[in-house]
Image: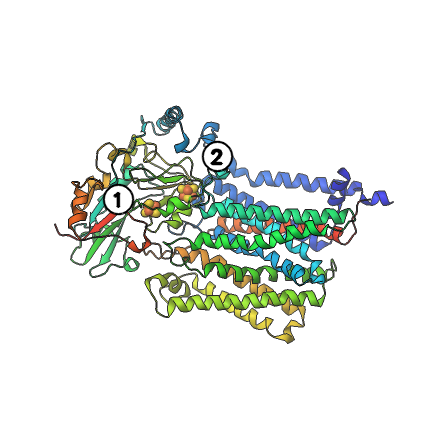
Amino acid sequence: MGDNKNKLSRREFLTAAGIGAATCVASAAAISPLLKLTNKFSLEEFLQKNYRELTPEDKKRIFKRLEREISKKYGVKAKISDPPPLKGVKYAMVINVGRCIGCRKCVYACMKENNNSRSPQVQYIRVMRMEKGKIDLETAVHDYPESEAGQTDKYWYMPVQCHQCEDPPCVKVCPVSATWKEPDGIVVVDYNWCIGCRYCLAACPYYGRRFNWAEPQIPKNELNPDMAYLSNRPRYKGNAEKCTFCLQRTRNGRYTACVEACPTGARKFGNLLDAESEVRKIIDKERVFILKEELNTIPKMYYVFSKA
Amino acid sequence: MINLISKFTKVLINGNKYYILWVTFLLVLVLIGLHAYSRQLIYGLYTTGMGDEVSWGFYIANFAFLVGMAAAAVMIVIPVYIFKDKDVKKIVIFAELFAIAAVIMCLSFVLIDLGRIDRMWHLIPIIGIFHWPESMLTWDVIVLNGYLFINIFVCFYFLYKKYHNQEPKTWIYLSVVFLSIIWAPSIHTVTAFLFQGLGGRPFWHSPLIAPRFLSSAFSAGPAFILIVLILLDKFKAIHISEHTIKRIRQIVTICLLINIFFFFSEVFADLYMPTSHSINLAFLLGVKGKSILTPWIRLSVALSIIAAIMFLTPKLMKNNVFVVIACILTDIGIWLEKGLGFVIPGFIPTPLGDFVQYKPTFNEVLITISVWAGGLLLYTILVKIALPIINGEIRKE
Ligand code: SF4
Ligand code: SF4
């Protein structure tokens, strides 16, 4: 009898087996949506290392693969480059809020240049509209209608985007070092290394980071085929991204898309280390201010009130 | 081995009708959540109510709450070894089993919140990149896994010895238990630091966050264990003395009072002379603007105060029904405080002053419920197996 006490009876055995089988079947049914998984699993992509650990050969191979994938998906011949940071350069931007008319031309030029998702829409720049006499973000409005741009008698407008902090909180908090500051001061994200924890979104004091909540969508004919690995190549679902000062352009001696698009010349861009650069001259001569200076992240985005 | 499996299978499939109903109920919830999570995997976190503004929501909120619950198991352990409280000793195992289930729930909440769970291996030291010591999240990975490991060891060792009809060796048991006592506060301290360290979020950037995590955890956790013990006693699974109940009740009461005090201290500092940094709290409490969280946080304060009054009324505490009610109020109150009143309001307004509202989606709620159901299911199974071993009904022949 003592022996039997511990043995499963026939009925108990069948019960246990039945419960086990039913649970398996039900679990399979529960995870059935996974059948819709369209993206094929690629072992190569899965095992890809962090950008900063890649050898030149690795990079060549990976860029080729990405170009192939992008060309196939969008039907456009894509070119992925990897322009290195220039020596003796630290980029900075100055925004003249005395000139900004809040037209949001920069917002859309940026989105196009950088292949941001259009649906859901991802914008790097947010233009804050403030009442005259106030510098108060809490009463500022960012979703004013198109028709209320340019009312410079009543309001003033302040565009905000990533401030390319010298001491970036977003970089500090990232658990896997998927984001870092390049030698020219640009903070970048490796879209293939980010695990999507969004700690960086919580840490950024300037609302500079965005997340791909869904699979990014870009109409085929709107894709900008001229891309860099660390900036405007198409992103993935579930990873973080941000403004990169258009490094695909600026490291090749061009202006950022927002600077080019601004109809009033409110945006200036250049090398902070070059005493003759436009940005340095403004910073040296004008009364510039830094947003949330007390947080001490040392932004490289300066604001200036100037009619000139 | 086969013998052992069949013994435990026997224990697991035989139970009264409440047990069967309870387990089936939890299992169904888990499966529903699994389905919801599959949808989230396919369509992305777009299926949640989160966005670039409120970028952490229900998942991380529940995580913050459960970290406290997991750590609170030690509150039961401390009196046993410091006050040599023989009576509480018997029940430590139930608290530690709960710690295991709670840490597993915590880890699940973090995992389901990831945008790219397939890249999880990037977090593993050596093969990935572990951004330690800079990132507080890496600290959290260490302390949570360490705590899980310690508690698994303690429980396994204790039950193994009991099963083999031996007393656990005091020095092994004690040293690991002491390790877990030292370790436990670290898991919610680190979790509090995760938020507290962010200079750009004034609502979290307060030195009182870590102490508040401790006080809320040390009232909510033991309150939950007390409910479990009174229920087990009622179903005659174990016997709990009045003395034990009183001891745990005292822990809950003191911590609850401290927690309420901390809350008002923070409210006072922020609202007596409101600065621009008080805006999150003012919005949350409904002093300024209209937040959909306001009624919930007010309810949370009310529940905590009612529970505290109940605990402080000796007449009520003579009846265990009221003890259980007070414990339930405590747990709901603190869940509301940590769940809705801590993580989410840190994002509102955004750093650019945007007063967004956050509401979890149906899918998100289903997933959240299923993590809870999974944790409770695990706890039920662990307790179900542990009970006959502790009561000496299952032994190695
Ligand atoms: S503004 Fe935000 S995203 Fe940009 S570097 Fe600073 S912390 Fe990072
Ligand atoms: S979301 Fe990506 S980049 Fe941001 S902290 Fe997490 S892993 Fe790093």
Residue at 55% in and 39% down: A31
Residue B13, visible in the rendered structure: no
Vertical relation: A258 (above or below) A289: above
Vertical relation: A273 (above or below) A285: above
Please report, as a chain letter, where disc 1 is located. Answer: A
Confirm if mark 2 falls within 8 A of ligand 2. no
Pick out the residue farthest to the right.
A1
Gap in angstroms between the C-alphas marked 2 and 1: 33 Å
Q: Is residue A267 left or right of residue A23?
A: left
Residue at 40% in and 67% down: B269
Residue A240 pos. (x, y %): 39, 42
2 or 1: tag closer to the N-terminus: 2
Residue B395 pos. (x, y %): 79, 47
* SS of the residue under disc 1: helix
Residue B34 pos. (x, y %): 55, 44
Say few, some or many: other residues with alpha carbon within 10 Å of mark 2 (under 14 / 14 to 19 / 20 or more).
few
Circle 1: residue type: Val
**Quadrant holding the N terminus of chain B:** top right
Q: Which residue is mark 2?
A: A37
The quadrant holding residue B274 is bottom left
Front position in the image: A286 or B263: A286
Q: Which residue is mark 1?
A: A107
Please report, as a chain letter, where disc 2 is located. Answer: A
Circle 2: residue type: Leu
